[in-house]
Amino acid sequence: MTERDNSQLDEVAARVAEGEAIDWDETTRRLTDRSGTLMELHAIAAVMRAHGTESAAPRATPDVSAPVITAAATPVFTWGGLEVRELLGAGGFGEVYRAYDPELGREVALKLQRGEWSPTVQARWLAEARSLARVQDRHVLTIHGADHHDGRAGLWTELVEGTTLESWIGRNGVLSAREATLAGLALCEALAAVHAAGLVHGDVKTRNVMRRSSGANAGDLVLMDFGAAHVAVASDRLAARTSESTPFAAAPELLEGGAASVQSDLYALGVLLFRLATLRHPHEASSLEALKASHELGRGLRLRNLRPDLPREFVATVERLLERDPSRRFATAAELESALGETLRAASPRRAVDPGRARGWRIAAVLVVLLGAGLLARLAGWPSRDSSARTPRSGDAPRSITTNSQGGSDATTPGVATTTVEGREAPNTPATPKPAVARAALQGTSTLWRLRDGEVLPITDGSRLAPGDRLWLDYSGTEAAHVYVLDEDSADEMYVLYPCGGSGLTNPLPAGTTHHLPGTRSAAPLRWVVTSASGEETFLVVAGRQPIPALEDVVATLPPVSDDREVEYARLPPDMLQRMRGVAGLEREASPAPPHKGSRLATLAAMLKGPEARPDLWVRLIRTQNPGP
């Protein structure tokens, strides 16, 4: 494949990530030798459409911190004093254009309504839009003005360069509780400013929140798209609202024809947090009537069931936001902000991070690469981090990755949770009568994820895997740690899945951030791919304050990684259990390990977590099955 073909494929992937329309027949003719990859990209695009990832919001636009040079641009038409230059998008509200405002001396976004409103509705909407223009907050889209010209009402706003939360999670997966909380804090500030002006937003959702990628306020989250919301509030047309926006984000009282309120905005924020953490909505249905029934009968999804690893404070806050009775929700955005702040402090004693700059989000490409029996879904680049927490790269990561992963059984009891190894008091020495103070146990959290047919779910004990599943592990810890991910199949073959050469991550993994294992190559995430069905599969995650020599020796046998070589995994020798007895200070002469019953990794986990283990290790075992069709 030529460099030009690679560039064209990257362009297609980026367009899929942004939800743009693609002529697949023409693209396949141009890239005939990449038909398999294009087929996967086409499927991903279909999944994104099904889950609402494609957005009618305007695509990323230039930053407006400086005036835009205008001489070369020719207006398509004019509206009032604005020179309209380009259609950026369309939605339930109407069309969104790039326009030039001669008075401001810069480009703006112009939103024009479709024109079918009554004069009374237009007048009310313009009054509310002008009130909103007086709201000044860094997390609220700046509205320059609103008016009526040529038979159409419209408003013009700043242009924001960045990406929406919906696009981000569509490409990168769920957020941690901390990351979602930081986003929630920024949006609390935004809603407090809107509500203080006597207004409601009415359409808070992931597609209406963007993160600035440049300019003086780069990193800020911005609440967008007030146009459709004010149409809904002003005209009280429920059917139009639920079809043109996202009914899954609507509070139950709105579905029954009630008016938008502060509490309905907060409910929508609860749905947004739920979606950031799960990629799902708390109530999902195929019709409006079925959605209403789901609310009435209390058949919604439970956050704890979808994300057992989340802190109870975060789960409780989201559940309160999603109460069917508005009076049981938080009364104001300020009250919610206080609760989220407590959630953040409970989850992490570290210094709080500016909520608007929580992550270095960036627009990244979607790329799928087929190699042999393995398929790597390169759905996006991982977020950049603050430099103090960024993982060092050891070179480019591989283009593809497969694993001999044949595990999984029907999920019965979700069990993704923080695991710690209790510490022991160090023994006294003859010269020191005082007992040594035991070091606090190493603590961490991990979640093994599965991507199948566009659905992302956590893997727990008993989960069912299938060939073609893409897997990855999220790990975070309170200290820098050397992390190892081991795999054992039903044929008693054991492998080190991480660390693996060229994955873009190296041990020790820094504290204070979530690491996505096995890592990345060329800014695209790598996945472990289930290649066949073969009974039980066991995964063991071990983190230590120091390197584990027995595992490091095995990893060292891997050949050097180059751009044209796939990632390779180290096979664990049969005597690994005996070698690992040296880990955590166990004596080789101690009683032998009990014979394993179907899994040597299970035996190893029991040994490492046993009464002789030191607090320098964190261990988690996941046993799955994959019986095949």
Image (cartoon, helix red, strand yellow):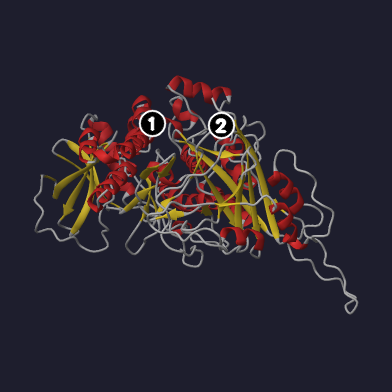
Q: As drawn, is 69 to the left or to the right of 497?
A: left
SS for dot 2: loop
Q: How many marks?
A: 2
Q: Residues within 10 Å of mark 2 (few under 14, many from 20)?
A: some
Q: Which mark is residue 301?
A: 2
**Which amino acid, by three-letter code, is at mark 2?**
Leu
Q: Residues within 10 Å of mark 1 (few under 14, many from 20)?
A: few
Q: Residue at x 66, y 31 (%)?
A: 412
Q: As drawn, is 481 to the left or to the right of 235?
A: right
Q: Position of residue 588 (x, y in %)?
A: 79, 60
Residue 422 location, quadrant: bottom right
Is residue 615 visible to us here? no
Residues 480 and 109: in front is 480
Measure the C-alpha gap from mark 2 to mark 1: 19 Å
First along the sequence among labels 2 and 1: 1
Q: Position of residue 172 (x, y in %)?
A: 44, 47
Is residue 290 visible to us here? yes
SS for dot 1: helix
Dot 1 corresponds to which residue?
Answer: 50
Q: Residue at x 36, y 36 (%)?
A: 40
Residues 200 and 588: in front is 588
Residue 92 location, quadrant: top left
**Which amino acid, by three-letter code, is at mark 1?**
Ala
